[in-house]
Image (tube, helix red, strand yellow):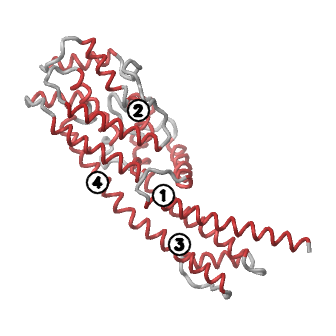
Amino acid sequence: MWHTARVSVLKAVVLVAGIFAVLATIGSAIRVVILPRGIQSRLARRVFRVIRIFFELRMGRRATYERRDRLMAQYAPIGLLALLVTWLGVVLTGYMGMFWAVSPDRSLRTAFRLSGSSLYTLGFERPTDLFSTMLAFSEAAIGLFLLALLITYLPSLYGAFSRREVMVALLEVRAGSPPTGVEAIERAQRIESLDLRSVWDSWERWFIELEESHTSFPTLVFFRSPQPERSWVTAAGAVLDAASLVASTLDIPRQSDAELCIRAGYLALRRIASFFRIPYDPDPQPSDPISITRAEYDAVVERLAAAGTPLKADREQAWRDFVGWRVNYDTVLIALAKLTVAPYAPWSSDRYTSVR
């Protein structure tokens, strides 16, 4: 009698655990694919963390950027497939426990066959009692639901990726490769058009869409550009630096669109960083330190002066103004460059040693 009671309690616990596992998987799928808001899924986060560990071990500490790029290009797609396999595996295991718990004489092996047959709608193992039949129907529906979610998820994902990459590719025309803010200003100076209001407007919209897509579809953060030397992170840094130089250093009529672009940019980068739990100061002071040194700034100013760019006479105030703009996105830009293993670019990914 005591043994029978223990088995009954064990079956009840397994039944509850199986239900919880299935519900948790459905919740994870809804948060990752359906919910249009940047809410983390613990299951998805752990899957991508484990996959990242394997990728880092394979790359090693001394790998060249070319090898890192080739490997990291596979990280997001493999992570998505691993997430689907994990969802299906958890559902299969949860239902296996339920099938075993609701029958007094069903073995674990039979429960496994029944769960797998139901999940993948194979039909080689069929339940006989009503409750098990209901479980089989629900498991088959969940399996189809998860597969359909991924199929519908991919077009939205690649649509957002394509829109992002169009602007990243266009930036090479204006800012070179790797892109830099000073290069963008120099090229504008050569064609005698420092009125960049249309550029700031386009990139303000790009930053707004970047925030929405990369928090709703966080996998997009790790999708790499088709060209190894391009990255959405370094592109963002180049545009923000160009706008900061225009707002602080150039002696031209004020371009308020540049300042709005900076705000849109640092808000987007901060919210993406918040999703990945990257720490930053939400209210930095204009006098806070940044990763750009005064010597680096002066070198850029001299380069602009040599190109004939009109510059403000008070360089001390210009430096303070530049720091006041850069401090808003400095920390998150560098952290995201490291997170995504971005290619080398001045004033962004060159701030940490592993990309050199």
Between the residue at mark 4 and the residue at mark 2, the CA separation in whole angstroms equals 24 Å
The first of marks 1 and 4 along the sequence is 1
How packed is label 3: few (under 14 Cα within 10 Å), some, or many (20 or more)?
many
Disc number lying in front (3 or 2) = 3
Disc number lying in front (4 or 3) = 3
The residue located at (24%, 12%) in the rendering is 315
Label 1 amino acid? Arg
The residue located at (55%, 82%) in the rendering is 122
Q: In this view, does 253 lie above or below 90?
A: above
Residue pointed to by mark 2: 334
The first of marks 4 and 3 along the sequence is 3
Residue 185: quadrant of the picture: top left
Residue pointed to by mark 1: 31
Residue pointed to by mark 3: 142
Q: Give yes or no for contact between labels 2 and 1 (Cβ–Cβ under 8 Å).
A: no
Label 3 amino acid? Ile
- Secondary element at tag 2: helix
How packed is label 2: few (under 14 Cα within 10 Å), some, or many (20 or more)?
many
Between the residue at mark 2 and the residue at mark 1, the CA separation in whole angstroms equals 28 Å
